[in-house]
Image: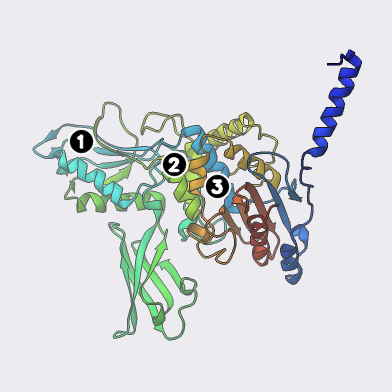
């Protein structure tokens, strides 16, 4: 075997390196132009390519394959929920829950609680009427028939900022504009069933949600013609007093029965009305009143109920783009415990501070992610397409990746994507979070190509006519799913 000098060995090593490098496939070139189908859609809509910010990158890391306006700050709409839900899964853990408790301030004698019964919120983002009824039933099963004092509602687990539900878009009665609360009950939303009554040429409105002291008066006119966007033809308002919700406008007989969800009451009144109704429905009596208040020292536990796990909660948030749940979970990031009554209130400042520290720990501090309330229902929240793509690459490498992936709508199958991508190679395969504001349409998530390799896709249109750019966003997903970027 020939012997080589150190110099010759270095030359041979270098030659071998360049030979191997020449035989390896070249990395894909960075594209700065949209796929042809997306360009054609934009041209037909007379929209500039600059209306879009797009990044396509390997999910398992590496540089983007496609990058267009990747560093431009844009409004993410509800794709911001990816930041909130990934952070919650990582910081709190997929199995974490939030506890709602009942505590008594006095003894129980012959079925009578000689004191107050305190309902202590733990910030549960999905505390439904059914869950609260179950909690009250547990108290009744433990011998409390009558509360001699008050039913006290302690909502101090969270300290949300002042919230005007109509400030964002003037739709203050729409449930998506409800604000977070330490005792968020039933998303602060009531359900009405609208039923045509042709015999009376009227529309019946049935209040399905138990709310003590609220009456519903239907002044809806039954009309002929197609159903159309029936919600836009209904004007809810309060009559001469705040105890009567009046529905005015037209309702087409062709609509049949429909469910209408509204959030017409302030959080304090809504929770009090529901708590009274459910306590009485469970067979309980109240000697005093239902009021807000803090848990006094020396109380004793009566019953408790835990929320769904964070893994389940993020599924509801992302599949159905639930804004109030996202805002609630964001605030919970700033809380030091998931147990009711055992931590100081958490507000937006604590949540943002913890989220920023988490982003820094994940190497994402300089990626242009600016968080306001964590839901995307804000004009202050911004991201860059590249920053959001890198966050998704981080999530792909994280232990909580399976939970985050399972929480996203499946193209053409469920959630907010149920009716999209029906004739697309992405159908049943891509998992994407949607986003929609007046001037924004967004998609972000994970898309497998035909070879089975997964890609991160972020596509955000911000333009006065962003709605017309929606097919171009879908075309980017089709380009990834239908080939090998």
- Label 1: element kind: loop
State the image coordinates of residue 310 (x, y, percent, origin top left). 43, 40
Asked if 158 appears above or below 169 in the picture, the reply is above
Q: CA distance from mark 2 to mark 3?
A: 14 Å
Q: Residues within 10 Å of mark 2 (few under 14, many from 20)?
A: many
Toward the front, the furthest residue is 1
Rendered image: mark on residue 115? 1
**Rendering coords of residue 61 (x, y %):** 67, 38
Mark identifier at residue 372: none
Mark 2 vs mark 3: in front: 2
* Quadrant in the picture for residue 422: bottom right
Q: Residues within 10 Å of mark 1 (few under 14, many from 20)?
A: some
According to the picture, the residue beneath numbered tag 3 turns out to be 81
Classed neighbour count for the residue bearing mark 3: other residues with Cα under 10 Å, few (<14), some (14–19), many (≥20): many
- Using residue 426 as the reference point, say whether residue 5 is left or right of it: right
Name the residue rendered at 19%, 50% in the picture: 282
Q: Position of residue 269 (x, y in %)?
A: 36, 52
Q: Residue at x 49, y 48 (%)?
A: 407
Q: Nearer the viewer, mark 1 or mark 2?
A: 2
Judging from the image, what secondary structure is the residue with disc 3 in? Answer: helix
Q: Residue at x 87, y 13 (%)?
A: 3
What residue is shown at x 61% (from left), y 37% (from top)?
Answer: 394
Instruction: Answer left or right for 212 relative to 178.
Output: left
Indicate the secondary structure of the residue bearing disc 2.
Answer: helix
Q: Image check: 388 left or right of 273?
A: right
Q: Which mark is residue 311?
A: 2
């Amino acid at each position: 075997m020939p012997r080589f000098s150190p110099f010759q060995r270095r030359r041979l090593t270098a030659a071998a390196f360049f030979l191997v490098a020449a035989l390896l496939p070249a990395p894909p070139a960075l594209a700065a132009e949209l796929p042809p189908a997306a360009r054609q859609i934009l041209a037909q809509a007379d929209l500039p390519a600059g209306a879009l910010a797009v990044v396509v990158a390997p999910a398992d890391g590496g540089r983007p394959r496609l990058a267009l306006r990747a560093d431009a700050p844009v409004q993410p709409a509800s794709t911001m929920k990816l930041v909130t839900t990934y952070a919650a899964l990582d910081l709190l853990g997929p199995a974490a829950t939030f506890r709602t408790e009942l505590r008594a301030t006095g003894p129980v004698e012959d079925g009578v609680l000689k004191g107050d019964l305190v309902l202590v919120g733990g910030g549960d983002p999905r505390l439904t009427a059914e869950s609260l009824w179950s909690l009250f039933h547990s108290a009744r099963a433990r011998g409390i028939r009558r509360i001699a004092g008050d039913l006290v509602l302690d909502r101090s687990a969270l300290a949300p900022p002042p919230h005007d539900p109509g400030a964002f878009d003037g739709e203050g009665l729409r449930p998506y504009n409800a604000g977070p609360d330490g005792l968020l009950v039933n998303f602060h939303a009531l359900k009405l069933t609208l039923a045509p009554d042709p015999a009376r040429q009227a529309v019946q409105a049935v209040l399905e949600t138990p709310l003590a002291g609220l009456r519903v008066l239907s002044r809806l006119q039954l009309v002929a013609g197609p159903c159309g966007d029936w919600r836009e033809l209904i004007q809810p308002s309060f009559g001469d007093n705040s105890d009567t919700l009046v529905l005015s406008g037209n309702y087409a007989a062709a609509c049949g029965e429909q469910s209408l969800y509204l959030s017409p009451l302030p959080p304090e009144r809504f929770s009090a009305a529901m708590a009274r109704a459910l306590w009485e429905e469970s067979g309980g009596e109240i000697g005093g009143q239902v009021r807000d208040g803090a848990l006094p020292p020396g109380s004793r536990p009566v019953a408790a109920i835990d929320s769904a796990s964070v893994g389940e909660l993020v599924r509801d948030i992302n599949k159905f783009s639930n804004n109030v749940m996202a805002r609630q979970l964001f605030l919970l990031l700033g809380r030091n415990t998931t147990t009711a009554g055992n931590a100081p209130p958490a507000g937006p400042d604590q949540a943002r501070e913890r989220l920023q520290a988490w982003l820094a720990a994940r190497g994402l501090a300089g990626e242009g992610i600016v968080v306001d309330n964590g839901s995307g229902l804000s004009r202050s929240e911004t991201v860059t397409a590249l920053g959001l793509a890198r966050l998704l690459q981080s999530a792909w490498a994280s232990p909580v990746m399976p939970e985050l992936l399972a929480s996203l709508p499946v193209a053409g199958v469920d959630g907010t994507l149920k009716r999209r991508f029906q004739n697309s190679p992405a159908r049943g395969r891509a998992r994407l979070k949607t986003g929609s504001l007046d001037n924004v349409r967004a998609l972000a998530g994970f898309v497998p190509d035909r070879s089975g390799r997964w890609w991160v896709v972020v596509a955000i249109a911000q333009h006065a006519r962003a709605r017309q750019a929606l097919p171009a966003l879908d075309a980017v997903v089709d380009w990834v799913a239908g080939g090998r970027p």
